[in-house]
Amino acid sequence: MRSLSNRFLMLIAIAAVLLSAVVTSLLIFKPFENYYPLYVSGRTLYIKAYDPVITKEYDYQDLDSSPKTLFAPEGKSLAILNLEVTNAASAEIRIIFNENSSEFISTDGFTYKPTNPFSISQNTTKNNEDLTYPIWGPFTLNNLERAEGFLLFIVKDSFKPSKFAWNASDRVLISFD
């Protein structure tokens, strides 16, 4: 009877060691993890960024649904970064999207601050319903509410995105390949 229970305990110990080796390797190598690489969480915010659009001219709809156009200054380009910012905290938070809220870092080391799109936009007659809205100014987000829109950056013509850093209310860093 004693030898049977010792063998049984030995088999359980061997199985536990093998199982822990398999689970550990799954945790280290994460073979089943399929995530969007530009979706990052801070302490209270989830931020999803899309690949930036680098252009000289950009059409969008203002908050009153009037069509507007942004034009890049001479020798510069516009970097349009579409964002989704979700409040994952249990309480409401106040976010201010302004020139101090974030920064865009290029591969050549230059850092760019967001620009108020309303300061350089012009009215236009183009009418496209698939355009996004600028995300600028103060927002109050309740639990699980989301703010969507784009941030505008005026960048050099040679701009290639490296990192987007969110500095307001949380510190989130998103790397671009």
Image (cartoon, helix red, strand yellow):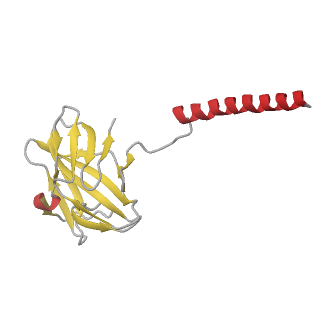
Q: Residue at x 23, y 33 (%)?
A: 107
Which part of the image, by quadrant, shows the N terminus?
Answer: top right
Q: Residue at x 21, y 46 (%)?
A: 103
Image position, residue 14 (x, y; %): 73, 28
In this view, the residue farthest toward the left is 74
Report the front residue among 50 and 62: 50
Report the front residue among 39 and 130: 39
In this view, the residue farthest toward the right is 1
Image position, residue 167 (x, y; %): 24, 50
Q: Residue at x 68, y 33 (%)?
A: 19
Image position, residue 54 (x, y; %): 23, 44
Asked if residue 68 shows in the view, the reply is yes
Residue 101 higher or lower than 128, as above or below:
above
Q: Residue at x 29, y 59 (%)?
A: 149
Q: Is residue 31 left or right of residue 103?
A: right
Q: Is residue 73 left or right of residue 162?
A: left
Which part of the image, by quadrant, shows the C terminus?
Answer: top left
In this view, the residue farthest toward the front is 2
Asked if residue 131 shows in the view, the reply is no
Number of marks in the rendered image: 0
Image position, residue 15 (x, y; %): 73, 31
Residue 8 higher or lower than 133, as above or below:
above
